[in-house]
């Protein structure tokens, strides 16, 4: 299964939609958003693309009530989990949070194959040693809106092969 991992869109809906559209063209079946959506309108163009979106809060909540209402009225296309999410996609157990320190701690716990986080606006893909003697993938897609970063970025992920490719957000 291929997915699109994004974070920190900060109300830049067109940039979010452009990244998700590119991922969909390459076969993505779902989207993970690691927080800081800000408003429900941020997702309207992205929801129109038809991929299921899984999202968590961030530290910039914006309008969580409107976002939760959008999730309730999305016919299952948008899932809004709150602070964090424990998902299974493509037979992979995935944990999603906004904060890198929390993500690293969950990766160290070793209960998930993949932990996704955001907040720093800096993309990063690494394997984190865990307490079971193995390693957990820890990925941060940076900011899909490019805020505070050299480039606007997101991650195209192949969960079957556990490959993670940092991409630049398409120009809009």
Image (cartoon, rainbow, N blue to C red):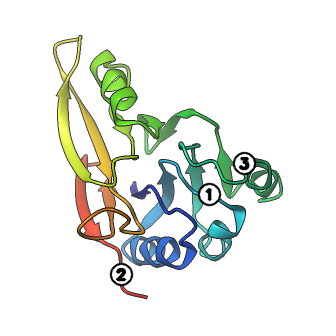
Of mark 1 and mark 3, the one earlier in the sequence is 1
Q: Quadrant location of the C terminus?
A: bottom left
Taking the spot 39% from the left edge, 42% from the top edge, the residue there is 117
Q: Quadrant location of the N terminus?
A: bottom left
Q: Which residue is mark 2?
A: 170
Question: In the shown orientation, is residue 169 left or right of residue 124?
Answer: right
Q: Callout 3 environment at 10 Å: few (<14), some (14 to 19), or many (20+)? A: some
Question: Eyeballing the image, is 142 above or below 25?
Answer: above
Camera-side mark, 1 or 2: 1
Secondary structure state at the residue bearing disc 3: helix
What is the C-alpha distance between the residues marked 1 and 2? 21 Å
Q: Which residue is mark 1?
A: 38
Q: Which residue is mark 3?
A: 64
Taking the spot 36% from the left edge, 74% from the top edge, the residue there is 26
Question: Eyeballing the image, is 162 above or below 92?
Answer: below
Q: Could you tell me if the residues under marks 1 and 2 are in contact, i.e. CB atoms within 8 Å?
A: no
Secondary structure state at the residue bearing disc 2: loop
The quarter of the picture where residue 40 lies is bottom right
Q: Position of residue 98 (x, y in %)?
A: 46, 40
Taking the spot 47% from the left edge, 37% from the top edge, the residue there is 97
Secondary structure state at the residue bearing disc 1: loop
Of mark 2 and mark 3, the one earlier in the sequence is 3
Question: Eyeballing the image, is 141 above or below 20?
Answer: above
The numbered dot on residue 129 is none
Q: Callout 2 environment at 10 Å: few (<14), some (14 to 19), or many (20+)? A: some
Of mark 1 and mark 2, the one earlier in the sequence is 1
Front residue (pair 171, 76): 171
Q: Could you tell me if the residues under marks 2 and 3 are in contact, i.e. CB atoms within 8 Å?
A: no
Q: Position of residue 88 (x, y in %)?
A: 50, 37
């Amino acid at each position: 299964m291929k997915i699109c991992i994004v974070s920190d869109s900060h109300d830049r809906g067109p940039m979010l939609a452009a990244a998700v559209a590119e991922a969909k063209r390459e076969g993505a079946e779902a989207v993970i958003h690691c927080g800081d959506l800000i408003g429900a309108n941020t997702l309207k163009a992205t929801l129109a693309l038809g991929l299921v979106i899984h999202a968590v809060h961030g530290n910039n909540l914006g309008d969580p009530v409107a976002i939760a209402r959008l999730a309730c009225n999305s016919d299952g296309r948008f899932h809004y989990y709150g602070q964090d999410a424990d998902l299974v996609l493509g037979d992979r157990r995935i944990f999603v949070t906004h904060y890198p320190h929390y993500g690293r701690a969950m990766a160290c716990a070793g209960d998930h194959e993949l932990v996704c986080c955001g907040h720093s606006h800096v993309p990063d893909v690494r394997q984190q040693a865990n307490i079971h003697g193995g390693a957990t993938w820890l990925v941060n897609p940076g900011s899909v809106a490019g805020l505070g970063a050299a480039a606007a970025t997101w991650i195209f992920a192949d969960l079957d092969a556990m490959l993670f490719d940092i991409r630049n957000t398409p120009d809009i």
